[in-house]
Each structure stands twice: as C-alpha cells, then as structure tokens.
Image (spheres, grey):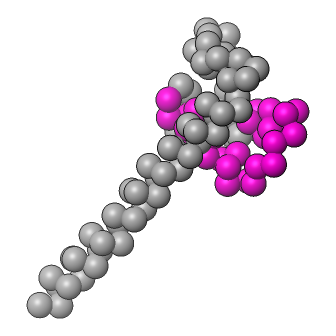
Amino acid sequence: MNRLMIAVASICIGLPSANADNSVITDGKALNDENCVRCHGSELYTRPDKRVASRKKLSTQVRFCKDQLQLPWFDEEVESVAEYLNKEHYHFK
C-alpha cells in the first residue's frame, strides 16, 4: 500500500511540471506574437546566418529586444519568449 501511494504521488507531482512547461511555451508564443513580430517576422529565426549561437545568447537577444522596445516584461517573460523561440526555431539543448 505504501509503494502505491508513493507511485501515485510521484505521478501527480510530475503532472504540474509538464503543464507548467506547456504554459511557459504558450505564454512565450503570445508575447512573441504581440511584440516581436512588430519589428520582424519568423524569417529572422529561420535564416541560415543566425547570429544567436546558444540558448544563453538567445535569452540575451530577447532581453536586448525587450529593452529596445521598452517592454515592461519580467525576467520570467523574457525566458518564456526565449524558451518558445528555442523550441520552435533554434533547438538548443
């Protein structure tokens, strides 16, 4: 009985993180669609001569763009956009 309870608890604990990951991507997409495409479309992310070469640099670039547009984003929102872009276009580990 104890093992069953532990197994169920482990599964339940894992579920919110999967949902949280999906919401981060969804939030990042929404922020990107509302703000980033104002200056450029997705062709920037798919061109062969991408300037961004790592996941860390992707976050730095998103933060730079946020600052240039004077967007009132929190750090979590910057990371949400970077995570969305990484998942959809860059595929850094």
Give the x, y percent position of residue 27: 56, 46
Please give left or right for residue 64 compared with residue 83 in the image: right
Q: Which residue is drawn at the image coordinates 64% and 39% (left, top)?
A: 31
Image quarter hosting the N terminus: bottom left
Residue 68's place in the image compared with 16, above or below, is above
Residue 15's place in the image compared with 54, above or below, is below
Give the x, y percent position of residue 24: 53, 50
Residue 64's place in the image compared with 18, above or below, is above
Please give left or right for residue 2 compared with residue 61 in the image: left
Q: Quadrant of residue 29?
A: top right
Return the residue found at the far bottom. 2
Secondary structure mostly seen in magenta is: helix
Residue 14's place in the image compared with 64, above or below, is below
Magenta span of residues: 60-88
Q: Quadrant of residue 30?
A: top right
Residue 55 visible at all: no
Q: Is residue 5 magenta?
A: no
Give the x, y percent position of residue 46: 58, 15
Return the residue found at the far left. 1
Q: Which residue is drawn at the image coordinates 80% and 38% (left, top)?
A: 66
- Count of marks, rendered view: 0
Q: Is residue 84 magenta?
A: yes
Give the x, y percent position of residue 53: 67, 26
Please give left or right for residue 67 compared with residue 6 in the image: right
